[in-house]
Amino acid sequence: MLIFIIIVNNTLKSSLPTVLSTETQTLASRAFESIKSDIIAGRLSQGSKIVESDLALKYGISRGPLREAIHRLEQIRLVVRVPHAGSRVVALDSKMIEDIYVARECLEGMAARLAARHMTDEDIRSLMELLNQHERDIGKAEGKFYFQSEGNIDFHYRIAVASQNRWILDNLNGELYQLIRMCRHQSGQAPARPQISLEQHRQIASAIAFRDEELAELLMRRHISGAWKIVKTILEEKHE
């Protein structure tokens, strides 16, 4: 009987760290998503210092899961570690943002060209329905903003995936993706931009549907260069 109790107790003890580890990972994932959303939307200011005690209180989480969340945010470049100064929210200066848009114009232009070549008719129908949903979302927001959640309900993400090009996908939807979303959040709130952006998305989708690779690339490049002009104006006004 004594041997049985010892075995049971040892089994419970060996399983306990796994349970705690799983719970910690779940809490860290929730904190990661919440902090990521707040950084992208600007609710956590660019360049602001990461103070663990403040964030733990704000997000209702202990230090362990919070540190794991911060580590994951560092991996996707939304948080940067400064030597002897701790961690800070990434700060996108004008040069960095311009570089992002230049890279986007090239990569997403080619992604649109390849999407026109590779997307199935069913994929295109799904893309059109996605844009219909975006139109309804803009209507609910009274036309004030056009900000897409990440992943498969993001028009640009869909196009990148449809390119079927590993290198384009790795660059656009890897570490660069969240920085791109930060930039897009700024342009998406400019007056009249939501409706204009939606119409441009429809034009790109239409070119893809007609299998016009050259036009799809051209329209995507114009769309992104236009967004950069808006962001550039916003940045210039902030520094006046």
Image (spheres, rainbow, N blue to C red):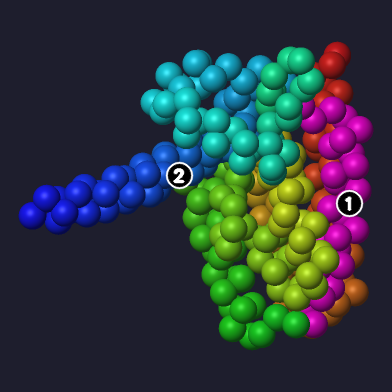
Q: Is residue 188 above or below residue 66?
A: below
The kind of residue tagged 1 is Ala
Most frequent secondary structure within the magenta stretch? helix
**The residue tagged with tag 2: helix, strand or loop?**
helix
Q: Is residue 160 above or below residue 49?
A: below
**What residue is at 75 percent from the left and 82 percent from the top?**
118
Q: Is residue 14 above or below residue 71?
A: below
Label 1 sits on residue: 103
Label 2 sits on residue: 25
Mark 1 / mark 2, whichever is N-terminal: 2
Number of labels in the image equals 2
**In the depicted view, which residue is nearer to us: 59 or 87?**
87
Q: Is residue 176 above or below residue 167?
A: above
Residue range in magenta is 91-117
Q: Is residue 57 visible?
A: yes
**What residue is at 50 percent from the left and 22 percent from the top?**
55
